[in-house]
Image: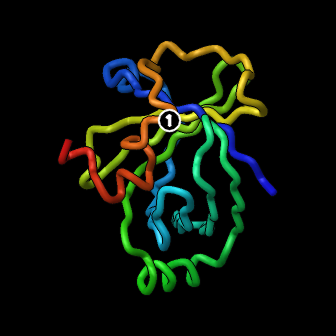
Amino acid sequence: MGIEIERKFLVDHKQWQQLPKPAGTKMQQGYMVNEDDRTIRLRITDKQAYITFKSGTAGISRNEYEYEIPVNDATQLFAQFVKTGLEKTRYCITHEGNLWEIDVFEGDNHGLVIAEIELGHEDEYFVHPPWVTVEVSGEEKYYNSSLSVHPFKNW
């Protein structure tokens, strides 16, 4: 069983725009099951696709099972079974030895930028980059699964 321990932060737009960053990866993400206590997610990039099963969150932790699947299969599954979805570009930046994944949302969530860090345990120490602001871990409206149903443009 995999366990995801993740913290999320809003990103300062001005600092983010000025930050040198690597090329991002465009993603299409959709939910076949999107309930409070479980999700089944498809994520597709131009080169890879994954199906992910997640339990409900307890604190900043939850059970997670993720499997790579053929992109063609994922595209077909997406068309047939996805109920809600979103688009984003992900940037991966290492800061003080930790990998940060920064999602710049598109479409109905345009204008929202969220940084995530996955940890080995809930109390793990890490240095906050200067471009992160308010922590939003545990705030459901910032979960990707929630954004697929209640997009940022409607807040």
Total tally of numbered discs in the picture:
1
Residue 104 visible? The answer is no
Furthest residue in direction right, as rendered: 1
Name which residue lies at 51% across and 51% down: 25
Find residue 1 and report its image quarter: bottom right
Residue at which label 1 appears? 138
- Identify which amino acid the numbered label 1 is placed on: Gly
Question: Which quarter shows the C terminus?
Answer: top left
Residue 9 lies, with reference to residue 147, above or below; the image says above
How is this picture coloured? Answer: rainbow
Residue 131 visible? The answer is yes
Q: Position of residue 74 (x, y in %)?
A: 55, 78
Residue 106 lies, with reference to residue 43, above or below; the image says above
Q: Position of residue 111 (x, y in %)?
A: 27, 38
Name which residue lies at 51% across and 82% down: 77
Name which residue lies at 32% across and 59% down: 149
Find residue 5 and report its image quarter: top right
Residue 96 lies, with reference to residue 53, above or below; the image says above
Relative placement, left or right, of 127 versus 72 is right
Q: Position of residue 38 (x, y in %)?
A: 56, 61
Find residue 125 and report its image quarter: top right
Name which residue lies at 38% across and 35% down: 113
**Mark 1 neighbour class, 10 Å CA radius: few under 14, some 14 to 19, many 20 or more:** some
Secondary structure state at the residue bearing disc 1: loop
